[in-house]
Each structure stands twice: as C-alpha cells, then as structure tokens.
Image (tube, rainbow, N blue to C red):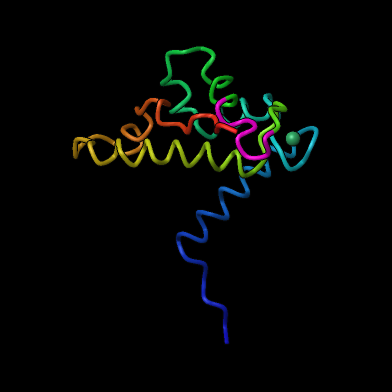
Amino acid sequence: MRPSPPTEMERSMEKIITVFQRFASKEGSQGSMNFKEFENFMNVELISFTKNQKDPNIVRKIMNSVDGGVDGKKNNELDFQEFLNLIGGIMVAGHEALSKCPPKQARVTCFFSSSPRHLPPPRQR
Ligand SMILES: [Ca+2]
C-alpha cells in the first residue's frame, strides 16, 4: 500500500520543526536557540510581527517571557518546547485578530497587527 501524502497539518507541523532546527543549529547547542539565533529567527521568519512592535526591546522581552517556562532554567536558551509555547501564544493572538479582521484586509497583515500581550506569562513555579 502506498503511503498517503502528508496532510496540510502534517506539512505545517513539519515546517515548524524544520525552521526551528535551521535557526537553532547555527551556533552552540543544536537543539536550542540562544538570543542571537532567536533574534535572527524573529527578524527573518516573523518580521511582520517584529517590525510592528513599538518596543525596541521586544525580542528580548519575548524571549524572557518563555525562557525557563518548560525546563525551569532561565539560561538564555529556548528549547523546542519553549519555542512552541511562544509560537502558540502568537498563534492564539493571531487567531483572535483574524476573527476581527475586516474582510478586505490582507489576512497576514491583520494577523501580525496583534500585540504580544497575549503571549503566555512566565510560568510560576
Ligand atoms: Ca543553538
């Protein structure tokens, strides 16, 4: 039996993993992003979101908001699960924004006009 082609969701999930690995493997640990790798990721892959923020320290603040949330180590490194928490927070904000989008506005513009206040707060331990 021929394997069925990957679904849209499977391809999307694989892409997120691939992008994470590409940026995380540039230096240091291959399995996590240091600040430089994360900043590079935000400025390449999420540029519409990043440039829409008024706070010049937004990338640092976003990283701090998820760093340590999973492994409990505030070590200036984002592992994949911490990265997913971040992406999940942005997607939740985007999902809410999209439901309020005027019909003619480009969906991607609308998605990224949302503010990072929807990001998950640092987990209490
Ligand atoms: Ca790394």
* Identity of the residue drawn at 72% across and 28% down: 75
The secondary structure making up most of the magenta span is loop
**Residue farthest to the right, as pictured:** 28
Q: Which residue ends up furthest to the left in the rendered image? A: 103
Q: Quadrant of residue 74?
A: top right
Q: Is residue 63 left or right of residue 110?
A: right
81 vs 118, left or right, is right
Q: Residue furthest bottom?
A: 1
Name the residue rendered at 63%, 40% in the picture.
Answer: 70
What residue sits 68% from the left and 29% below the top?
A: 37
Q: Is residue 51 shown above or below 3?
A: above
Horizontal relation, residue 24 to residue 115: left or right: right
Taking 97 as reference, is 64 above or below it? above
Ligand 1 visible in quadrant: top right
Residue 54 point in image, percent of width and height: 42, 13
**Range of the magenta residues?**
65-72
